[in-house]
Amino acid sequence: MIELTSAVQTLLKSMEETMTLCGLSVVYPEGIKKGEAPFETDGDKHIITLSSNSGAARIELAEGKLYVLCTNKKASEAQENDYQQLAVSLLEIDDASFDTKDIKSVANELCESVEKFFGKSKKITVGKEAKTAVKKGGKNSTVTYEPENLAVRITNIYPELKEALDANSEKYEMILPEEFFKEHANKLIIDSIKNGDQQKIKKLFNVFNMFYEEGPKDTQSLVAVSILGMNLKDDSQLLEKVEGYMEKDLKSAVTSVIRYFSTLSGKKALKSIQNPTPYVSKRIKKK
């Protein structure tokens, strides 16, 4: 188990490049010296503030989650309602299996959001043609809940999939999440469930619950249909193993999908899903 102070220090250390890129520096609360973990506590919430001449970022840790908020105002001038929430990640430092690798992974996700907000964003580093994540909520916000981002998040749980995701991006000039999960990720996900890998299962469903709750319809379909519904429909025991990990909305969606696949129209739809129209590249080949 990692202590809060150590987690904060590792998080900020992992963010140094982004902080420099965005001109951000740590705001030390009163009574906290440089070198100490610079967070203030408000109830069960721990807050880290970063500020620059062009805006500020706030990192909030509460109930096993890390929230990233940004504003175009300096930290000394910003009010509570000036901050815009950009993303939410898991930071379960109370989990015995949580380690520095997990913190660094969360830091990478946080950095993407902050860089996007301050106009310093880079493409998702999974291939030459990988597309930049765009939030459905507006031009100044970064979404981490698009299908492409789910694919990237899963490679943090299964690093061995990063090469496959990079190849997917290179082949299709963008990330094609459906193909990535069908051909590569789903097998590892289902194997983890079958093997009762509690650490992996917990991480997976924390991600699935979050993406289903926050994501657009295509992300919800990817989670509830392509990843879970398709692979749990024929194994009631496997479904029982993970029902307790699903939050209410996701559980309802998955069970509805499984029921639908048992109907006549559902079986027809299943054939269409299992045999999709091949993707045709729009890349113009040089003669």
Image (cartoon, rainbow, N blue to C red):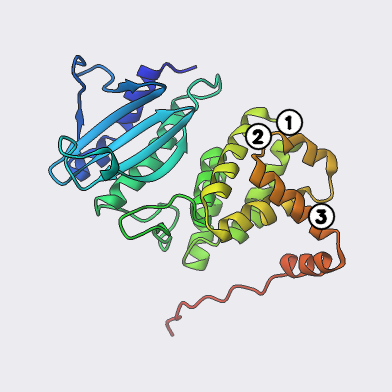
User: As displayed, is residue 197 above or below residue 172?
Assistant: above
Instruction: Please say whether residue 126 is visible from this viewpoint.
Output: yes
Mark before the other along the chain sequence, 2 or 1: 1
In this rendering, the label closer to the viewer, 3 or 1 = 3
SS of the residue at dot 2? helix
Q: Which residue is more in the foreground, 100 or 160?
A: 100
Q: Quadrant of residue 206?
A: top right
| Residue topped by disc 1 | 196
Q: For this view, does 282 lie left or right of residue 80?
A: right
Relative to 180, say whether 34 is above or below: above
When the figure is inspected, residue 263 is found, relative to residue 181, above or below; the finding is below
The x, y position of residue 192, in whole percent, is 69, 37
Query: Which residue shows up at 42% across the image and 34% down it?
Result: 66
For residue 201, the mark is 2
Tag 1: amino acid: Gly
- Residue 148 circle label: none
Calculate the distance from the C-alpha at mark 2 to the C-alpha at mark 1: 8 Å
The local crowd at label 2, few if under 14, some if 14 to 19, many if 20 or more residues have their Cα within 10 Å, is many
Task: State the residue position of label 3.
Answer: 259
Q: CA distance from mark 3 to mark 1?
A: 25 Å
**Residue 242 located left or right of residue 95:** right
